[in-house]
Image: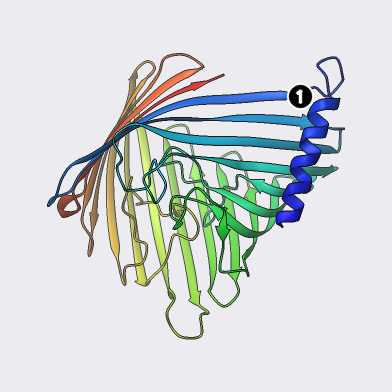
Amino acid sequence: MKTILIALMGTLMLLSGTLTANEINPVATSAQLRFGDITTEPRIGACENTLAMGGRFGLLMPVSDEVGAGVSFYSTNALLGEDDNRYFLDAQNNGYALAGEAWLSLDVGKTQLKAGRQLVDTPFVDTDDTGMILNSFEGVVATSTDLDKVTLMALHLRKWASRDNESPEKFEDINRDKGISGLGMSYAVSDAVSLQAWHYQATDLASMTYIEAGLESEAFNLAIQYTTQGDETGDDSGLDGDAWGVMADYSLAGFTFSGAYNRASGAVGNGFGGGPYFTSTEDHTIDGVDDERATMLGLDYVGFGPLTLLVLSTDFDKSEDEADWIASYSFNNSVSADIVFSDMGDDGKMTKVFVNYDF
């Protein structure tokens, strides 16, 4: 795969030199400047804080109607402080830069094949936008919309870069050198009803199946989910169990009242990312805890124009409870800000602030 990536980077450089603004398929650029501040307050120990600046710069280069290429570079650098929780910095509390995306794509009809480093968002493989830099994956992803109202996806991923890794600044093996494969389908039954089903296979590690159904209306939403996960390590060291969940919300006069419940039998995991569970909070999920149960209640308000306020309270049966207060403000189409305060009981408190400028 390293040889393929070197070839991809070389191809992208050649393409950027041959395409001009006067051609039918010009080079498109996108960028984001991101400021982040995180403060962690453990119940016992010293408070830590990091103020960081980072961002993303990307190039999208359509070669023809069928072939495309893209590359994006990500970075994060500490301006003040060196918090060691890996939300913002690497394992040595240093800033870092990463070629998070470098891919080639081929479109045939309504089917696309994309190979290289790329962003992937599925139930158990996702970007997990909780820090300065998104999770990114290296592999091959095929997506098809040939069938009416149906989207099919197949993937095989060998590496990923994530704050969950030992070295967030590098792409590391998924499941040693065996990777993970997945098949998924989403079906828009109607404007109101949707279904999705996924199966993932990580040889000698785990198998994961996920099913979700949703019902949406102008004021009321309802969804159910189920996952079963099998330990395939051969030594009973992996997660093995199943979990189900239900969530509902109702909107009235700018307020949205929401509730969710998850229950696990055995232990289930988040996969490679933040996980799909309805009761997942800013920091805690039902991941990895035997027979865990979680109940979430939420209230958000959108009556202040560009300001959105959200309060979530989640009770975990065997882990620390968590309460989240979130405020989001959109200054214009380019500038936005988010403030998140999390009270995690004996696990301490955490405050995150992000300001994004997209251009």
The secondary structure type at the circle numbered 1 is loop
Q: Position of residue 327 (x, y in %)?
A: 31, 28
Front-lying residue, 353 or 161? 161
Which quadrant of the figure contains the C terminus?
top right
Residue, x 30% and y 66% (percent of image)? 292
Q: Residues within 10 Å of mark 1 (few under 14, many from 20)?
A: many
Q: Position of residue 115 (x, y in %)?
A: 74, 50
Q: How many marks do you count on the picture?
A: 1
- In this figure, which colouring scheme has been used for the structure? rainbow
Q: Can the viewer see residue 192 in this picture?
A: yes
Q: Which residue is mark 1?
A: 27
Q: Residue furthest bottom?
A: 235
Residue, x 52% and y 57% (percent of image)? 124
Front-lying residue, 5 or 357? 5
Which quadrant of the figure contains the N terminus?
bottom right
Looking at the rendered structure, the kind of residue marked 1 is Val
Residue 304 figure quarter: top left
Front-lying residue, 170 or 272? 170
Q: Can the viewer see residue 253 in this picture?
A: no
Residue 253 lies, with reference to residue 120, above or below; the image says above
Residue 192 lies, with reference to residue 20, above or below; the image says below
Residue, x 28% and y 40% (percent of image)? 298
Q: Position of residue 152 (x, y in %)?
A: 70, 53
Residue 11 lies, with reference to residue 291, above or below; the image says above
Q: Position of residue 229 (x, y in %)?
A: 48, 71
Residue, x 71% and y 36% (percent of image)? 70
